[in-house]
Amino acid sequence: MLAQDLLNDLRAAQAKLEAAREDAASLKVLLALRTHQHDLAWQDAQRLAAELAGVRTQVNALEADLAEARTSAASAEALAEADERTEAVRSVLGAVLDSIGSRSLDRRRFQEIIARAGREAPTDGPGAARHAVLLTEARRVLGIPG
């Protein structure tokens, strides 16, 4: 009977050992699967980090281009305004030349020419600078203190 109990215990121990081996094998497979998933996730993270660095570089380059474009646009706007102011001075000078009679400046004719130039000048954008220049220079020609 003792031998029979030992044999049964041995068979039970072998069954437990076999079950443990099967569990160990399935855990190895699960570990391998998780390791593979982790490796894939790590590779994806590395790839995305590299893409993010590339995108940040592109953003920085685009921001630099935008800043340059804004500077260029400001310069172009300042140049356009300067051109308009120059054109306004030319208008005043042309009005003076057109209003000079044989003896003196025809003030009424000069004022009419300047008023017409003021009506023709744009009210917004760089051309709006003409109004201030026309007023200032016309006052100067007419001897009106500004």
Image (cartoon, helix red, strand yellow):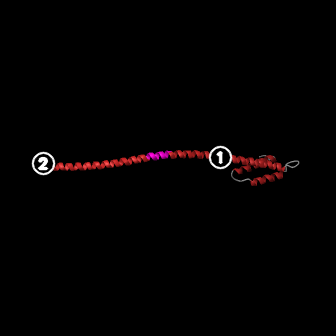
- Residue 143 percent location from the top left of the image: 81, 46
Q: Residues within 10 Å of mark 2 (few under 14, many from 20)?
A: few
Q: Amino acid at mark 1?
A: Ala
Query: Helix, strand or loop at disc 1?
Result: helix
- In this rendering, position of residue 120 left or right of residue 50: right
- Residue 35 percent location from the top left of the image: 36, 47
Query: Helix, strand or loop at disc 2?
Result: helix
Q: Residues within 10 Å of mark 1 (few under 14, many from 20)?
A: few
Answer whether residue 131 is magenta in the image.
Answer: no
Q: Amino acid at mark 2?
A: Ala
Measured in 3D between alpha carbons, the distance from the residue under mark 1 to the one under mark 2, in whole angstroms, is 103 Å
Residue interval drawn in magenta? 45-53
Looking at the picture, tell me which residue is in the foreground, 118 or 38.
38
- In this rendering, position of residue 143 left or right of residue 73: right
Answer whether residue 49 is magenta in the image.
Answer: yes
The residue tagged 1 is 74
Label 1 with label 2: CB-CB less than 8 Å: no
Q: In the orientation shown, which residue stands out farthest toward the right?
A: 102
Identity of the residue drawn at 26% across and 48% down:
21
Looking at the picture, tell me which residue is in the foreground, 123 or 136.
123
- In this rendering, position of residue 73 left or right of residue 86: left
Q: Disc 1 vs disc 2: which is toward the camera?
A: 2
Q: Which mark is residue 3?
A: 2
Looking at the picture, tell me which residue is in the foreground, 76 or 133.
76
Q: In terms of secondary structure, what is the magenta stretch mainly?
A: helix
Identity of the residue drawn at 51% across and 45% down:
54
Q: Which mark is residue 114?
A: none
- Residue 15 percent location from the top left of the image: 21, 50
Residue 113 appearing in the image: yes
